[in-house]
Image (tube, coloured by chain):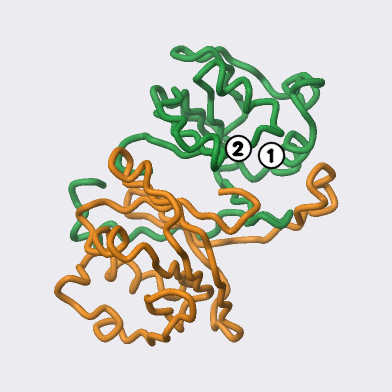
Chain colours: A orange, B green
Amino acid sequence: MGFEPTLGLCLGPWNYSYTAMKEVGECVVAVPSASLLEQVVAIGNCSGETIDKFKEFELTAQPALDVNALLVTECLYNLECHVVNCQLVNDYNFFVLQGVRAWRNQSPSDTRSFHAVGDGTFIIDGEVINLRHKMTKWQDCI
Amino acid sequence: MGFEPTLGLCLGPWNYSYTAMKEVGECVVAVPSASLLEQVVAIGNCSGETIDKFKEFELTAQPALDVNALLVTECLYNLECHVVNCQLVNDYNFFVLQGVRAWRNQSPSDTRSFHAVGDGTFIIDGEVINLRHKMTKWQDCI
């Protein structure tokens, strides 16, 4: 949400994680690679209330260091987060998270991430364009 | 931010648009195609306070219908928005917007969009994957 490692996350009361997030006040945000896409969709279409998702989807859990949640070893990145603001949770299901520790997979088989477009389709990362030299106003931030 | 056309937007006080957004309470969110990337970076590295960006960057302005802001004809999509919540503006520069009218470019020369990665690099949209049939829990939303 800015130059700090602050994230905004929408999570509805229909998700099992919603209650956990409100109660525990911390979480891990894991960024999967494109090769995990089908697993991610399957994970998003069942509930942690009835299934151990790590076991069911053969993912490797690793303890985090600063929060009481698990890292997903296969993901590209894992960000340990504290919930720092809940003012918009009731009206918009919107949590503000502060990243407190970041992990990077140093030998991923696929470095491409993806975006959900919202209608059941997903867009895989394509070409990377480096325009750092044109960020004249923002050189201090990059 | 959910199944409604609600958007979250971070915009700092160092941007000319920030004051306008707070005062006017409405805006247009325009989604550029990848072919406009270099122009977008240039647009983000100067200020509307001293430059007419439409003129400078040879973009075509069109009046919106429900808000007092201009559409960018060359973009893929334009979303007319009302600011509906400013509770997190002081602490996080975070505005909540409600989309009130959407426009789609019906003959774009490039349909790929892109994401800023935050360090002066950008990732262009790659392959589109359709997994609607696997969204078993969310069939009503797609």
Q: What residue type is labelled 1?
A: Leu
Compared to A20, does B24 lie above or below? Answer: above
Residue at the spot 60% in from the left edge and 36% down from the top edge: B11
Relative depth, front residue between B89 and A43: B89
Q: Are marks 1 and 2 in contact (CB under 8 Å)?
A: yes
Q: Report x, y in % for residue A123.
A: 47, 57
Residue B32: image tag? 2
Residue at the spot 49% in from the left edge and 72% down from the top edge: A33
Q: Report x, y in % for residue B135.
A: 24, 59
Name the quadrant containing residue B138: bottom left
Q: Report x, y in % for residue A43.
A: 28, 70
Same chain letter for marks 1 and 2: yes
Chain of the residue on which disc 2 is drawn? B
Compared to A75, does A41 lie above or below? Answer: above
**Label 1 packing within 10 angstroms: few (<14), some (14-19), many (20+):** some
In the displayed structure image, the side of residue A25 where residue B14 appears, left or right: right
Relative depth, front residue between A53 and A141: A141
Where's the C terminus of chain A, which quadrant? bottom right
- The residue singled out by tag 1 in the image is B36
Residue B115: image tag? none
Relative depth, front residue between A9 and A31: A9
